[in-house]
Amino acid sequence: MLWRILSVLKNLKRVGFALLLLGVNVSAFAQPPDTLWTRVYSDLALVESTAVLQDIHSIKECPNGDLVAVGYSSYYPPGTPENDSLGGLVLKVSANGDLQWQTFLRGPTRLSDVAINDDGSMYVVGYIVINSLEWAYVSLISTDGDTIWTDIAPIDSSRRLYDLRLQRTISGDLLLSGSSRTPDTFLKRVFLAWLNEEADTIRVRYYTPVEQQVDPRNTRVTVLEQGYLLSFDAGSCGPFYVISVSTAGDSLSSIASSTDPCVQSFGSPFLDELSHVFVARNGLDAGFSKIDSNGTLLWHRHYNPWRALNTPLSDNHGGFILAAQDDSQFYRAGIVRIDTAGVQQWWSFASVNNADLRLQADLLRLNNGDYAVAGVCEYFFTHSWARFAFISRFDAPVFSNTIDAPVLPKEIEISVFPSPFNSTTEISFEMPRAALATIKVYDVLGREQATLLDDVMQGGTRSVMWNAEGFASGIYFVRLSVGNVGVTKKVALIK
């Protein structure tokens, strides 16, 4: 009777862990979040009497919970040269979406990104046109929207600058990234520039794709503890590149994914513990792709009628939250949850009556777990479109967790029981995280005799059986390898 009870408990434990792996306790029963609010800032066009909003490129959160969005407008005062018709735009709103202030930076500028300081001041980055060449620049803006200083960034002048982004490194420096085309040779390359708080140069690194015809676009950088993950694509039908960069800026490795499907990346990639890259892809038929460490496209999922997905963020429950644009009728903007197999779990979209919401800024996760998206809201009047900035905020998703997650071991372990054994023995092993695991059997001369496991396994305790029928009696060594770490256990087969 005791044996039967123990057997039932063991099976229940296995069933519970299987449910955890399948995400039944988390993703299947998670409810899509509510739209807390959507605000359209129609008065932005009045900041200059002849200004027309063009794009909202970035949104970030302040320490006090306020939100800051940056982009650019066109303005057409009488006699203004065409190259001088652009101006940077910064707007700050409260956690409830109320407009706090807006700043319009005159001059041939486009703002691309913003980095918020602990005191609420902020750095904005964009480019300025001087003598038909584009230069990157950084401005420091006060908490009240006043420009404290502006400085040209230490990037070579270019015919074109693309995808300028600004963020903090682990050490607290400013990291400027983007891509450029040189004015003389038209060489296309991506770059990283490390700046101090005065925008002085610490170092600059350029990365040129092997294929010189590559036109780097959609450049993004993911900051990791051990370095950086630099990604970009080669246009709508080119390869997708991922470059691993050290903290010093040295290129460690690079991959180029297959060119199918013929769509562009959109937003920063996500790197899991197995060095798989998850990237949202943009196009007429938007989707989500998984790429292995060799650049092979493992799968691509399409999601109609979406046109845009960007910046997958891990939800810490075995899936991703992405910003998305729904093109079913009037464009809507919102967030979508997708699991690690690319299966859509739920979605939540915001809309404005008789208007299109065009998603532009990367997805932002707020400190309290809420999410925010931003872009341009377009209204069609009698003869033309009017463009205004919009921000939508979504409640933090709630995940129901009905089964306690297992406590993971701190290191890999292996045990064999029974040993000595006759014909069959059980090999149990523990892993601290998901990884590719192999279990192989060797004889006393070090010759491989059998492979018992070669698969990606989740963290926790597992076991495999070794049926040694056909093996001669003697001493064998069972070796568990997880990544570049391995442990070996000696066993005795006696017949």
Image (spheres, grey):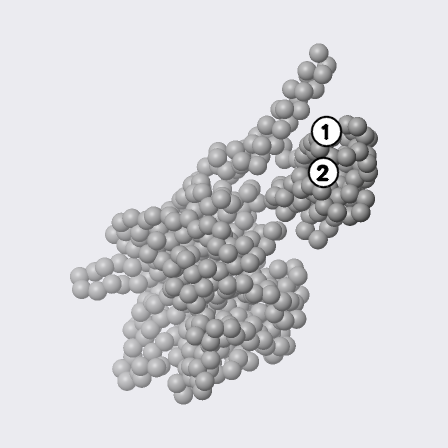
Residue placed most toward the observer, 33 or 317: 317
Q: Left or right of 215: which side holds 51?
A: left
Mark 2 packing: few (<14 Cα in 10 Å), some, or many (20+)?
A: some
Quadrant in the picture for the C terminus: top right
* Residue on which disc 1 sits: 424
Q: Residue 318 location, x and y as percent? A: 55, 43
Quadrant in the picture for the N terminus: top right
Q: Identify which residue is drawn at 65% across, 59% down.
A: 225
- State the separation of the CA atoms marked 2 and 1: 17 Å
Q: Identify which residue is drawn at 60% across, 44% down.
A: 456
Total residue callouts: 2
Q: Are marks 2 and 1 in contact (CB under 8 Å)?
A: no
Q: Residue 303 location, x and y as percent? A: 37, 48
Q: Residue 301 location, x and y as percent? A: 42, 48
What amino acid is found at the position of numbered circle 1 in the picture? Answer: Thr
Mark 1 packing: few (<14 Cα in 10 Å), some, or many (20+)?
A: some
* Residue on which disc 2 sits: 429
Q: Residue 185 location, x and y as percent? A: 45, 85
Q: Identify which residue is drawn at 29% across, 79% down.
A: 77
